[in-house]
Image (cartoon, rainbow, N blue to C red):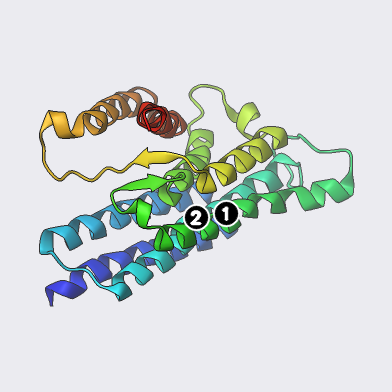
Amino acid sequence: MKRHLPNAVTCLNLLCGCLALKYVFAGELETGAWLVAAAALADFADGLLARALRVSSAIGKDLDSLADMVSFGVVPGAMLFSLLYMATGQEPGDAGYALRSTALTEILPYVGFSVSIFSALRLAKFNNDTRQTTSFIGLPTPACTLVVASLPLILSHDTFGLKAVILNPIVLVGLTILLSGLLVAELPLFALKFKTLRWADNRRRFIFLLLAAGLLLGLQAAAVPLVVLLYVLLSVPKTAAR
């Protein structure tokens, strides 16, 4: 029975991703964002549970990748599509950054699905790359998705007046290109896997968690892109030392 528990949590990740997709296409991006957060928690929990119970299987690994492709591949692409659709002024009452070219206005939102394509490439590489057993090479798909999912939350509670920045097509396209590149970049990044709780073994992880907690407490949803940037920057010294 215990060997099925991690897979059940993985299926919860998948369910949250499916529900998030439903709400995104219904225009309820904030609800979709919270479901993405729930999917990320489930994705983190299934790994913890599998290690705690000392169970693993090829089916579990494949199921995890399939669930991740929905929650952290299709969903962020759909979110970026919806945000770009809003940003190009195709809905009444949106930001009003309407582009002059009608053809370009209609095509541009589909650029958001680039993240879905590069997420598939990222997951395929991860499953076949023996270098990624204890760390990552390229931005993990959940981290990429949390950046995207933070945007609707920032818009819903725009404490810092970022709406004009977020709903700028140039910014959204630039973010899409940046995230797509980071997903498949040959960039070693540390994993949040604790074999022990000793400071010497986990200094980088503890520093990241402490700084991330401070940013989230102070900036809330607006901190998420900064937390992911911090994650990448803290990995740079390790990369440079190689």
Q: 68 above or below 232?
A: below
Is 100 situated above or below 111?
above
Could you say which is closer to the camera, residue 86 or residue 52? 52
Residue 209 percent coordinates (x, y): 26, 31
Circle on res. 135 = none
Residue 204's place in the image compared with 57, above or below, is above
Dot 1: element: helix
Give the residue type at disc 1.
Phe
Position of the C terminus, as image quadrant, is: top left
- SS for callout 2: helix
Q: Residue 59 location in percent, x, y? A: 31, 75
**Residue visible at 58% across and 46% down in the picture:** 180
Asked if the residue at tag 1 contacts the one at tag 2, i.e. Cβ–Cβ closer than 8 Å, the answer is yes
Residue linked to disc 1 = 118
Can the viewer see residue 27?
no
The residue at 48%/32% (across/down) is 157
For the N terminus, the image quarter is: bottom left
**What amino acid type should be assigned to the residue bearing mark 2?**
Arg
**Which residue is at the far bottom?**
1
